[in-house]
Image (cartoon, rainbow, N blue to C red):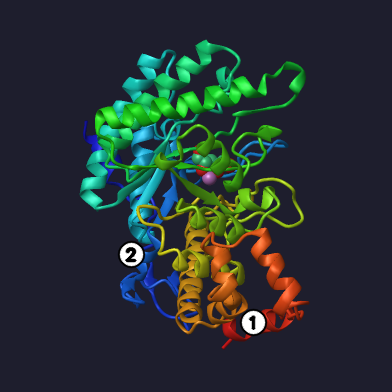
Amino acid sequence: MPKAKAQKSAEHFAGISKIAYEGPQSTNPLAFKHYNADEKVGGKTMAEHLRFSIAYWHAFRGAGSDPFGPGTIVRKWESSSKDPVSVAKVRMDAAFEFYQKIGAPFWCFHDRDIAPEGATLAQSNKNLDAIVAHAKQLQKATGVKLLWGTANLFSNPRYMCGASTNPDAHVFAYAAAQVKKALEVTQELGGENYVFWGGREGYETLLNTDLKREQDHLAAFLGMAVDYAKKIGFKGQFLIEPKPKEPTKHQYDFDCATCIGFLRSYGLHKHFKFNIETNHATLAGHTFQHEIEVAGSAGMLGSIDANTGDLLLGWDTDQFNTDVKELTLAMMSILKFGGLGSGGFNFDAKLRRPSIDLADLFHAHIGGMDAYAHALKLAHRINSEGVFSKKVAARYASYDSGYGRDIEKGKASFESLEKLVLGQLGEPTPVSGKQEYLENLLNTELFR
Ligand code: XUL
Ligand code: CO
C-alpha cells in the first residue's frame, strides 16, 4: 500500500539532524560538548568505552503518566494506524531514526515494549515475531545493535504476586515460557546480553509468604534459563539487575552483595554478572560507585543502567544523570576494573512529565551522554596519574611485606600475631584517613 510506504519512510524527528560534537565551548543545545565518538581516551575511542544504549520502554513507550494523572507526551506515530502491530512498526521506525540521530550504537527492550501482548501466549509470540523481523531489518539498515533484551514479568496482572516467585506454579510456568521466547528473540537480534530484573520477585507480607520456597523457585528459574541458553547456543552475558524495592516491598535481588550471596549459594554465580542501575543503588542506601566496586571486586561487573534518582524523593524517578562528580567517581571504578566488556551504558531514564517536545528527548540524551563522556575523560586522567590510587596503595603498604603479607597469604595466625604485638610491635601509631584533604583534591581535579 503506497500510504503505508510513505509513512514508513517519513521523517519522525523532522528539523533535527544528526547530533554533532562541537566541543566544550559550543552553545548549541543540540550538539555534544564532550561526547566525541571517535576521540581516543587511553587507547580506546569514547564509543568503545561507553557503548551508549537507548531504553525502548522509556524513550518510546513512556508517555509521562504518574499515579496522579495520565500521560502528557503525545507522539504522532502512536496514532498512525488502528492496528497495534502496525503502530508498533512505525514506532520502531521512529526509534531507529532517533538512535541514528543521537548516535547511540545500541538499544535495549522488554518483549512487551516492542510488540503488543495478545490474548494468548501464542498470539503474543506471533506479534513479537512480526516486530522482531522488522527490528532485524532496521538493525541491518542502520548498524544499531542490541545491547540486551529482557521479558516484562511485572506489568500483566498475572504477575501481581511475582513471576518465578509466584505461589502458583502455573504462573511460574507462564513466566518460563515467556522468558524462553524472549531469549530466542534476543538471540535472533544478536543481543550481547540478557537482563533479569525481578521487579515483583519478592513479597509484601510474610503472613502469606514462604520466603525459602520462593528463593528456591527463583534459583530454579535462573537455572532453567542457563540451561536453555546453552541449549540454543545463546552466547550473550546473563545480567541480574538488583533493586531493593519498588514495586515490591522486599525484593529478593536487593543489591549486588545480596545477589552475590544468593547466586553463590545456589551455584549460579559463574553464569551471571550485574546490570547496575544508579537509582537502584541509592534506593538500597548505597552510592552508585559502591555497587560498581562490589560487583567489580567479585568479577561480576556487567553493564550500567544510566540514570539517577532525586535526593528529595524516595522512589525510582529514573532521571537523566548530569552529575559529573558522581559519574567521575563511577568511571574511576569502572576503568579500574577494565571497563564493562559486553555491557554498555543504557539510558534507563525518562523525560519529566512536562517535557513534551520531541526535542526534549534529544536534550535529555545529549545531557546524559555528555556527562558520561566528561566523566570518562576526567576519570581516565585521574586514574592514569594515580591521583588517588597511589595514596590508597600507600595506605595499605603494611600488607605488602612481612607479617602484613603473611596475613594476606594465609600464613599468619592469632598466635603468630599475638607474639608480634607482645614483642617488637607493641601499640600501633594512628594514621590520618585524610578524607577532607582527598575531597578537596577531587574538586581540584574536577575543575582543573
Ligand atoms: C525498573 C528497571 C527495569 C529494568 C529492566 O526499575 O530498571 O526497567 O531495567 O526490566
Ligand atoms: Co533498569
- Mark 2: which secondary structure? helix
Number of marks = 2
Mark 1 Cβ and ligand 2 under 8 Å apart = no
Q: Is residue 212 above or below residue 348?
A: above
> Can you tell which mark lies on residue 48?
2
Measuring from the top left, give residue 225's x and y in whole percent.
39, 29
Measuring from the top left, give residue 193's x and y in whole percent.
37, 44
Taking the image as drawn, is residue 67 in sight? yes
Instruction: Please tell me which residue is depicted at 75% across the width and 51% down the height of the picture.
Output: 313
Q: Residues within 10 Å of mark 1 (few under 14, many from 20)?
A: few
Taking the image as drawn, is residue 18 in sight? no
- Mark 1: which secondary structure? helix
Tell me where residue 398 sits by quadrant.
bottom right
Instruction: Please tell me which residue is depicted at 48% across the width and 47% down the height of the picture.
Output: 274
User: Which quadrant would the N terminus be assigned to in this image?
Assistant: top left
What is the C-alpha distance between the residues marked 1 and 2?
Answer: 27 Å
Q: Is residue 191 left or right of residue 247?
A: left
> Can you tell which mark lies on residue 443?
1
Instruction: Please tell me which residue is depicted at 74% across the width and 81% down the height of the picture.
Output: 432
Tell me where residue 424 sits by quadrant.
bottom right
Measuring from the top left, give residue 278's x and y in whole percent.
59, 54
